[in-house]
Image (cartoon, coloured by chain):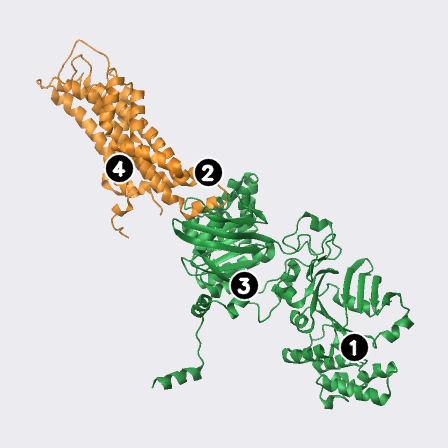
Amino acid sequence: MLKIEGLSVSYGKSLVLNGIDLELGVGEALAVIGESGTGKTTLGLSIMRLVEGTVQGIIRFDGKDLLKLTDKEMRPIRWSRIAMVFQSVNNVLNPVHTILSQVAEPIIEHGLSSRKEAQNRAIELLSHFGLPQSCFAAYPHQLSSGEQQRGLIAMALANDPDLLILDEPLSSLDAINRADVGRLLKESATGHIMLVFTHDLATASRLADRVAVLYGGKIVEQGPAQDVLSRPRHPYTRALIRAYPNMTTVKDLQGIRGRMDGAISGCPFHPRCTQAIDICSREVPHLVSSQEHQVACHRGGIVTLLSTRNLTKSFGSLKAVDSVSLHIEGGETLALVGESSSGKTTLAKTIVGLYQLSEGAVYLEGAKVDSWRKDFYQSVQIVFQNPGESLSHRLSVLEAVVEPLDIQGIGTREEREHKAVQVLGEVELPQSREFLGKYPHQLSGGEAQRVAIARALVLEPKLLIADEPTTFLDASVQAKILKLLLNLQEQRGLSMLFITHDIALARKVSDRMAIMMGGKIIEEGPSSQIVVAPKQNYTKSLLDTASALRIDEPGAARFLISKER
Amino acid sequence: MHIDLKREIKESSAGKTGLVILLIMVSIATLAPLIAPYDPCQQSISSLLSPSLSHWLGTNQVGQDIWSRLVFGARTSLLVGFGVGIVSTLLATIFGVSAALVGGLYDKVVMRVVDAFIVIPMVIVVILVAAYLKPSILILMLLLSLLGWQGGARILRAQALSLREKGHIAAARSFGAHRFYIARRHIVPDLGPILVVDFIYSIRRAVFMEAGLAFMGITDPTVVSWGMMMRDALSFSYLDIWQWWLIPTGVALSLTIVGLTFIGYAAEPVIEPRLRGAEVA
């Protein structure tokens, strides 16, 4: 039984851990995840009482507060009751002893059994963790780092500890060994408490039942591993997952804006958070325990930016959009996929009030939208399919980008122009006088669409609805525009409703997908799930007909030819 | 669709001819006091003179110089023409564009009023009203404008309706723009070429109507007008005088109308792009 209460650790003036609360029962495995520098290793070391900084709080293990024990009292607990596998393999093993004697050493040290029995237990453990017999007598420098890692794990388990702390246990292993050792660790963890520190989300999901996300010395989210990793609620957790390459994510990798800073007042993540409000910089949020999944966020986790409920738009007797309910979270992309005339554009235009809705309602940040006024358009903007048409042929680039500010009456003339030029820079367009004075017919398709995007972004909306923004562009320009949109999402936390008929494109940019057919949403879910395991036949046919490069194996081709004969 | 009205007119020979004629007429009208040797209303005892060096086109029955009256007649004609052109195009724009943008009941009411006016023959209404009012030139302009904007309004409404669905106007709406802003910043400038065509049509109609009403003698008799001159000339048709009294006036009026028609004809593809021939590259 391990219970940590209000644990704070500081090195000199810098606070590395700030009020950590954790509770672990026997048989539980918890993974603490976070970027490097978030204080994972420090947390492990402070449980082992090996940390050199100032430690405050309570670490209650088996009823005793470890922090109150003397070194002498701590010694028998260390290694026999609590064992740790350290991160850097190279420095841990003693170069002048063989691996076998090093695994046997803690057993002998703690006087638990005879030398002979210790040897046997060591051999058993080493073989269990897949080290070949020939390696037993080898010195650490003769072993590969993977073999050393297996040795270290065997060493930690030698005394059958109650609490096993693993700091990046699998990071020095390749994928195949990782799976193997991971499985063995998971097996041997039954009946123990296991605490895993890792930046590797796959390791966390492989080893642990529960996950705690550490950022800036605080736990920002905690809950069942499956739940946290598939439905993250803290913006940091989601950002971490987005940055992590794996086989289940289909969207392009995205980083996290800014960098981690120490000594921040309020929520440690607020400078990098895209949905931060005033209170975030002033007050530290606490883990709110609603059910099992807890999140420390003043906004209650990732906000739902826009939602529709039973939205219907009819033209006469035709229901172009039929009772559509969907939601878009802050900073995510929802792709709306469907063939032409499925009602995608009508839905988009109804959401932004270009069409009057027939039934249902639109909610912006939880509040029902009754009238589409100027303030609505400060939050929601739309980019249309054809940039050549959506830009007035009479307005120059600068005039076009300034127009939204003119309409909203924001700033003085100079401020508006300054802002417009700045946004043009953000969408990677030239900011020269010459370019600013160009008219739409003097621009290429890609440039025109960038101008249209800049114009939509100049109001700094939270949601950008992009209606087939790249259909008029060739593939390389399309790729650049999409990269741009994803970067903007990373930098500004822009939410997107991305409308397209191209599911191959949608999967690269979206977190979630909604499939639309005949005015209805027929399927909705995480993009990876829709792409891999579509439920509806229509979705399957969309996937089957999506563009793919059909590169057949030479053998298969021959087979076909011979069959035709 | 990028319409260049100037190019449209300049590239057609009819357009060029029309422009030249109109330009000449406008210069004559503006420079009338310099060109005319006499006060057009100055009566004298030397009536019904034949053309001479002092009276180029002779004099009329009350001894007024016909040339001077012809020159000042251009003033009246074009003043009424442009005045009506401006006011009726303005009315057409206000009602046409607002009907398109506001829609609903307002649109229906406006368009029914337009329909009603289009059905009623304008000439008869004008004659009836003018016969009762004996209108001054200002009232006449107002009358012609009030009866002449409906056709234009119908065309402008149709165009505004199609413009309203255009991307850049949808975009402006998605920035939170109000109808008035959209009308002022986008729709009216986009309607520009059509407004010019409507303006030309209105001028032509007004010039014609003014002359016609004056000819029938139901306008202010103190105003110098080509229509009235022709009416006066006709009552002396038994003399040779018609050669220098009736013909030059008729020609002046016809030229003005033909000039305006030419410009309108050249600019017509603006309203109906299908009239444009295949463009030579």
- The green chain is A
Quarter assignment of residue B260: top left
Q: Are marks 1 and 2 in contact (CB under 8 Å)?
A: no
Amino acid, disc 2:
Tyr
Q: Are marks 1 and 4 in contact (CB under 8 Å)?
A: no
Q: Is residue A268 above or below residue A541?
A: above
The residue located at (34%, 30%) in the rendering is B86
Residue linked to disc 2: B181
Under circle 4, the secondary element is: helix
In this view of the protein, which residue sits in the foreground, A97 or A528?
A528
Q: How many other residues sit within 10 Å of disc 4, few (<14), some (14-19) or many (≥20)? A: many
Distance between the Cα atoms at labels 3 and 4? 60 Å
**Depth-wise, is mark 4 or mark 2 nearer the camera?**
2
Under circle 3, the secondary element is: strand
Amino acid, disc 3:
Gly
The residue located at (47%, 64%) in the rendering is A503
User: Disc 4 sits on a residue from what chain?
Assistant: B
Residue linked to disc 1: A92
